[in-house]
Image (cartoon, rainbow, N blue to C red):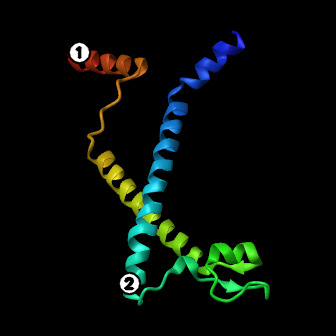
Amino acid sequence: MGLMSEFKEFAVRGNVVDLAVGVVIGAAFGKIVDSLVGDLIMPAIGAVTGGLDFSNYYLRLSSAIPENLPYAEAKKAGAALGWGNFVTVVVGFLIVAAALFLVMKVVNRFRRQQPATPAAPTKTEALLTDIRDLLATRP
């Protein structure tokens, strides 16, 4: 078997294709969650807390950073601990974790609801069934 045919067999195997689809969907889902957190949830939290913008909260670790700089500029000026951005990322993670939990809960519910189909009897089981039936019909 040539290298190309081996690669073709590997590439079209079901698990590889499923994984590729999962990665693409996961990337798209990540963008949705980033937008949900950055554009909806964190501004709402900021409005409730008096207009606080968590993405710009940081702790200056260098005296070279002037006060009241946005976090992006503070990182360029020196060492800054961006705890507000970390809070935003943690909120995003919690949303992803909760969404995956709910998805898996639904998937598991569907798996349980499907009736288990009995497996076809093996040759040995079929033979033993025939023998049992023959013995049952003997006087």
Local crowd size for mark 1, using a 10 Å CA cut-off: few (<14), some (14–19), many (≥20) = few
Q: Residue at x 37, y 55 (%)?
A: 103
Residue 112 image offset from top left, x and y in percent: 31, 48
Give the quadrant of the C terminus: top left
Asked if residue 108 is positioned above or below residue 40 in the image, the reply reads above
Q: Which is more foreground, mark 1 or mark 2?
A: 2
Q: Nearer the viewer, residue 78 or 115?
A: 78
Residue 60 image offset from top left, x and y in percent: 71, 86
Marks 1 and 2, how far apart at CA:
86 Å
- Kind of residue sitting beneath label 2: Ala
Q: Residue at x 48, y 38 (%)?
A: 21
Residue 74 image offset from top left, x and y in percent: 69, 78
To which quarter of the image does residue 75 belong?
A: bottom right
Q: Residue at x 61, y 24 (%)?
A: 10
Q: Nearer the viewer, residue 111 or 12?
A: 12
The answer to which of marks 1 and 2 sits earlier in the sequence is 2
**114 relative position to 30: left or right:** left
**138 relative position to 38: left or right:** left
Local crowd size for mark 2, using a 10 Å CA cut-off: few (<14), some (14–19), many (≥20) = few
Element under disc 1: loop
Residue 46's label in the rendered image is: none
To which quarter of the image does residue 62 belong?
A: bottom right
**64 relative position to 19: left or right:** right
Element under disc 2: helix
Location of mark 2 (residue): 47
**104 relative position to 53: left or right:** left
Residue 138's label in the rendered image is: 1
Residue 124 image offset from top left, x and y in percent: 42, 20
Q: Residue at x 64, y 82 (%)?
A: 69
Asked if residue 56 is positioned above or below residue 133 in the image, the reply reads below
- Kind of residue sitting beneath label 1: Arg
Give the quadrant of the N terminus: top right
